[in-house]
Image (cartoon, rainbow, N blue to C red):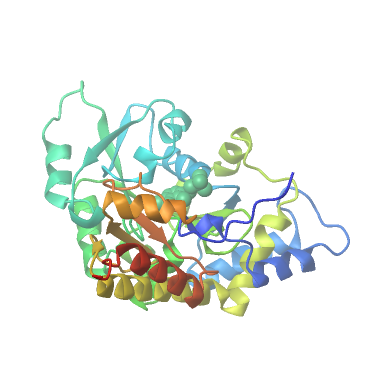
Amino acid sequence: MTKPIIKNQFASDNYAGICPEAWQAMNDANSGTADAYGDDWWTAKACDALRDFFETDCQVFFVFNGTAANSLALSALCQSYHSIICHELAHIETDECGAPEFFSNGVKILLVAGRDGKIDLDAVAHTVTQRSDIHYPKPKALSITQATEIGGVYSVNELHAVKDTAARFNLRLHMDGARFANAVASLQVAPKELTWRAGIDVLTFGGTKNGMAVGEAVVFFNKELAREFDYRCKQAGQLASKMRFLAAPWVGMLESGALLGHAVHANTMARKLAEQLHRCGEIEIVHPVEANAVFVRIPQTLLTGLSVRGWKFYTFIGTGEARLMCSWQTTEADIADFVADVTALTARPTPA
Ligand SMILES: *Cc1c(COP(=O)(O)O)cnc(C)c1O
């Protein structure tokens, strides 16, 4: 059997490989032996590097993937009779197979709408206040995604409005940061301005989509909520015995600057792709391009043509448009190839 090589894709940032900086760090961590289960030098150093990154004394845990990171973080914010409010397109609602509810023993997720994948704060207020009786699952947490599932970012001002709403209703704040680096790269502000200064209690910080092999950091700014979190990780099968290989890439990518550098690159590629597709005319860009995703409405015949030419991308995310996702590995040539195929497929036949 020959190994398929996927060349033509804007499917996901997790189709990309491991970036050189993460790979190098894993190689460095691979000399000799180290303590297991996170009691090693690399894990301590990665936690310190993240504390430097956020300029605060946060508490950090490393887990294998985003679903676990989100689910376990949320379970630390709620009792089983509580509810979590999030956007109707939130990954925790649409793409985690009920894991947040499962790991918090039955917590209910309550959905609100909102433009551009961002929660509408009046809708949040309504969801909290519409009932106060004992029969309603008591709202206890608010979860937002930065960058959002449809490629936008919350500005610092928007985050402060979210914080005020959370404070008003005594809701704990979770940020799904699977693409947090892309948000930082997009806004060009210090990471602290998007997190603890904006009232975030816990951030799930994605490493995988930004170039690591595997691994997300769960970062508690409210350290009180991190109590016994290590046990939750272990019980959920998320305590890596060779933790150094989850931790080392954070050291390598933070120290080299690759963490933000790759995010800047992915965002830049998305912006270029959007600009060039916009110029083609046949494809409509449907959401603001503020991070590394471009959402487009593509006519069915063109979709089919692109598929025949081997292009892969998702059409099930968000509201049913096609999602073109760029990564640290996307090149100008990838964009040129895609745009050339779009142009060829939409060319009017020249009159004889
Ligand atoms: C990819 C992603 C995750 C994590 O997903 P896993 O496949 O479980 O690693 C979480 N949130 C968002 C918004 C994502 O895009």
Q: Is residue 31 above or below residue 314?
A: below
Identify the image quadrant of residue 34.
bottom right
Percent position of residue 1, x then y: 74, 43
Q: Residue at x 45, y 65 (%)?
A: 326
Identify the image quadrant of residue 294.
bottom left
Q: Quadrant of the C terminus?
A: bottom left
Most extreme residue toward the top is 135
**Horizontal side, residue 62 vs residue 324: left or right:** right
Percent position of residue 23, x then y: 70, 66
Could one spot residue 66 in this view of the protein?
Answer: no
Q: Is residue 164 above or below residue 227?
A: below
For this rendering, which residue is in front, 193 or 280? 280
Could one spot residue 155 in this view of the protein?
Answer: yes
Most extreme residue toward the front is 352
For this rendering, which residue is in front, 67 or 228? 67
Q: How many marks can you see?
A: 0
Q: Residue at x 62, y 77 (%)?
A: 255
Q: Is residue 283 above or below residue 71?
A: below
Percent position of residue 243, x then y: 71, 52
Percent position of residue 112, x then y: 20, 42
For this rendering, which residue is in front, 297 or 291? 297
**Horizontal side, residue 340 vs residue 15: left or right:** left
Q: Residue at x 35, y 47 (%)?
A: 317
